[in-house]
Structures are given as structure tokens and as C-alpha cells.
Image (cartoon, helix red, strand yellow):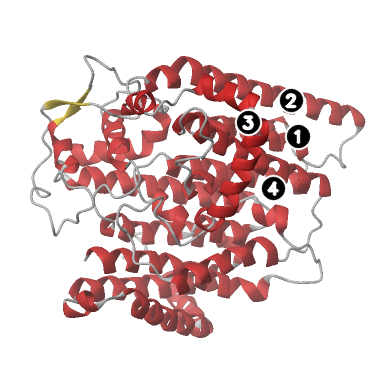
Amino acid sequence: MDTELGINKSGIVNYLFDFRDCLVKSKKSILMYIIMIALVSFLLLGPDNYAHPKTELIVIGLLVILGIFSIVLHYKNGNEKLYVTAFVVILIFGLVCCLVTPIISVSDEGEHLMRAEMTSRGVLFPDYVNGSYESISAMNFFAKSNDLTVLQVDGDTDKINHTADHKTAAFEQNPFFGYMFSGLGIFFAKLLDLNVIWILWLGRIFNALFYAITVSYAIKKTPIYKLPIFAIACLPVCLFQAYSVSVDCIVTGLGILAVAYFFNMCENKFTARDIIIVACLSLFAGLCKLPYLGLALLLLFAPTKNFNEDDKKRYYAYAVLGIILVLLIGVLWSKLVATPALSHSWRAQYMIENNVNISNQLNYIICHPFELFTGFFNYISKSFNNIFSMFAFYSYSRGGEYVPSQFISTLNTLFFGLLCFGYPVDKKIDLKSKIGALFTFIVVFVGICITMLLSWSPVGQLTFAGIHTRYFLPLFALLPFVCGINISSVKGDSMDYPIITMTILFISAMIISLTALYY
């Protein structure tokens, strides 16, 4: 009977025995994880949490179970199937974080949610009519529930109200594909006639699913730095955006995948198909955030030692053509679509009130180049800790959205430094590719800073306002390649299990921090 139903009892039993064996093998990592979870909880929980610990105990208990399961899963899969572990870890912790994170607490999530809801109705290019966009009345619930949990609001159990309504902001300047996954989640919330809160929850969950798929495929694709890519993709500052309806989830996922394809090109002989894929990924990321068009520059720096002269000429011709097309399409999109759409946003009024003018600012920069360099380096020196603080997963503070812990922040930043500088590989990295990756990093990094300078700072004030860590997330994946030591005699295997354990710990710490503050 079991065979007729397609159930292989012996296979299930063998799997359970294998899992049990891996549980025994991973006992040191599990013990380390449990001890660190206890320490993190002690550091993050306060008197109010201890007075009413029900929610905290449930969340921490769930995180312990998920963490142990993830550690054992990696022991079972090994590095050969790290992409499977990555998919499972990102998704299962994402389900918890998407539900625990307060309503509309991620940067600009309210406006992103408006656009995602429009996409769920098939509106790919929003119509701006009489100063507003068509929406539905259900969205009013989210407008009045910012930074609150479902335990603090009324109306979250109401059904979705489809009555037509109008809103004044909806990220019209962003491309529709940035909201396809979150919009699909909202579509299912409507299709299943769920409560209104599921508009947000399923939007977040489907974005988390996209991120899990993209990162796991990137890990599978790259022949080098698999574990650093996994750990960097799972940094709290990355996952906090990925577990939201923000378009930053899409940008980060596509950027990491483009980097993975570049790593593959550096280690294996590649074809025109790889060039097209990297160009397309750079284009899609760049249409969401213009400076990421610069990722296409990576195409110029793949090793060509295995090519003959004709192949080299053909490769560089394809690479240059790809870069030109990416830049051309990106600039046309910005000029013909994104910039006009900005005039419909509250940002246009901000620019008028604060004397922000891109053309005049460019003229000022051309006339005062030394002031630009001085302002840039002053900003970097003063804001280095903010930009590269891996545990400061909120982009900015509106009164403290997470429980600060200098110990956890320092530990997480040191962990990031280890991934970038200390993770060894047993393959020689081409110097031209390293330098090219560094050049690309600098171009995109500076491009982001200049873009923010032109878009937010008053004319003549070179203060680089509005720059947040989340803008640089895809670039983090390049750092192990650029900065990593290259000692072939050193094996990374002994570091792998502690890195996996610490990665899971920091994800758990992020969720505990949210729970400690909001519950």
C-alpha cells in the first residue's frame, strides 16, 4: 500500500537516521549557537520583556528550533549543497521576520506597498491623475499603523476592502518588475480573501522567496566564495530589506547574482550567453537604482587566458557592446520615465522647498571640484561606522527602531571583516579581475554618493545627505573577492561550520531585537 501511494518507507527512515547522525556531529555548533542565543537575549531583553515574557519566549524558542535545524541541515548537505541550506535558512527565518517586523517599519515601505498593490491589479505603469494614483481603501489601514504590531492595532482582521481610493505617492519612477513578487503575494491575499494584514505579510513573504531563490542560485552558480556570499547575503542589514516589500530586496538579489556570474566567468571559460546575463542583471538592478548600471563594467575584467586572439577580440567587443547598451537603456529610462515620474512625487516639492536642483548642483560641482573631494572624504571619515555597521539594519533612526548592542554590532562587523579579509580560497585569483572588481566597486559606490548629493542636497551644499547602508548592499558581495587573502595552502573547511553558526546567530539576533523592542 505504501509503495502504491509512492511512499518509500526505507528512504524516509534512512533520511531520519542520517539527520540523527548529523545532529550528533553538529553538537558543538549547536551548543555554541544556544549559548550565544542566551547571551544575545540577555543583552537585548529589558525589564518590560521580563515582566511579560510570553511573546519573547515563543519567538526565542522558535528561533532555537529553526537554528538547530539549519545547522544540522548544513552538516547533512555540506558545502556541495550549500545553496539548499541557503534557500531554507533565508526562507524559514524570513517567514518569522516578515510576521514579527512591525507594520510599515522598513524604510519607505508604505510607498513601496502602494506600488506593489497596484502591480497586484496588473497596473504596471501607474496613472497619475488629478494629483493622485488609484488604489483601494484597504491601504488606509497601513497608513495609520506605522511602526505598530498586530497586537497594538485594530482592524488587522478586517477583510480586504476593494473600494476604489486614491493615494498621492507610489514610487512611479521604479520599474514594475521590482514589485512583481510582492505584487504576486498581494494578489494571492486578495484571491484567498484573507484579512487585510496579509496584504503586507504575503507581499513580504514573496519578496523573501525571491531573495531566497536568487541568493541560493548565486551560491550554486559561483565556483568560489560560496560561503562568504551566503553569509553576506544573510547579514541583518541585507535581510531586513529582503524581508520587506521594498524594491531594495530585488536590487540586492539581482546584484549578488550578477557578482556570482562574474565569479563564474573568472574561473570557467564563458560564452556570449554569460555576457548577456551579466549585462541584463546589471540593467535590471540599475533601472531600480541607477548607479548599479555600473555592475556591467565587471564584463571587462574576466580573465581571457584560455582564449585565443580572435576569441579575445570577440569577447571584448561583446563586453563593450553590452556595457554601452546597458548604459544607454538606463540613461533613457532615467530621462524619459523616472525623472518625469519624480515630478509626481512628494520629492519634487522637497526639491523646490530646499533648493535642490540637479543641473545647478552639477554646475556648482564643476566650478568647485576641490570642495567636492573634500566633502566626500569628510563624509566617508565621519560616516564609515554608519555605512559599514552590519547590525544597524535600520537605515535611519526615527527614535530607535531596534535595541542597540555595542557588543553585537562589533561582533557582527568583525565577522564581516573576517569574511572579506580572512576567508581563504585554494584558487589563484586573477589580478586583473581583482583590480577590475575594485574599480567597479568604487564606480558604483561613488555613483551612489553623487546621485544622493544631486537629489537631496541644496545647491552649493556638498553634504551627501540621505545616504544609507542599504544602498550599498550588492557591493558587499564583491569585497571578499577584492580584499580576501589568497593562500592556496590554507583550507576554509575548518571555518565553515563556525561561519554558518554565526550567520544563523546574527539572523536570530535581528529578530530577537525586533521582538524585544516591539513586543
Along the viewing direction, whichever of 461 and 438 lies nearer the viewer = 461
The residue under label 1 is 300
The residue under label 2 is 320
Callout 4–callout 1 Cβ contact below 8 Å: no
Q: In which quarter of the image is residue 499?
A: bottom right
| Residue neighbourhood size for the residue with mark 3, other residues' Cα within 10 Å, grouped as few (<14), some (14–19), many (≥20) | many
Callout 1–callout 2 Cβ contact below 8 Å: yes
The amino acid sitting under disc 1 is Leu
Residue at (38% x, 20% y) in the render? 341
How far apart in space, not on screen, are marks 2 and 3 (Cα)?
10 Å
* SS assignment at label 1: helix
The amino acid sitting under disc 3 is Ala
Relative placement, left or right, of 246 versus 327 is left
How far apart in space, not on screen, are marks 1 and 3 (Cα)?
11 Å
Q: Position of residue 265 (x, y in %)?
A: 73, 43
Callout 4–callout 2 Cβ contact below 8 Å: no
The amino acid sitting under disc 4 is Phe
Along the viewing direction, whichever of 34 and 382 lies nearer the viewer = 382
The residue under label 4 is 263
How far apart in space, not on screen, are marks 1 and 2 (Cα)?
7 Å
* SS assignment at label 4: helix
Residue 172 vertical placement versus 71 (above, below): above
Relative placement, left or right, of 111 versus 255 is left
Compare marks 1 and 2 and give the one earlier in the sequence.
1
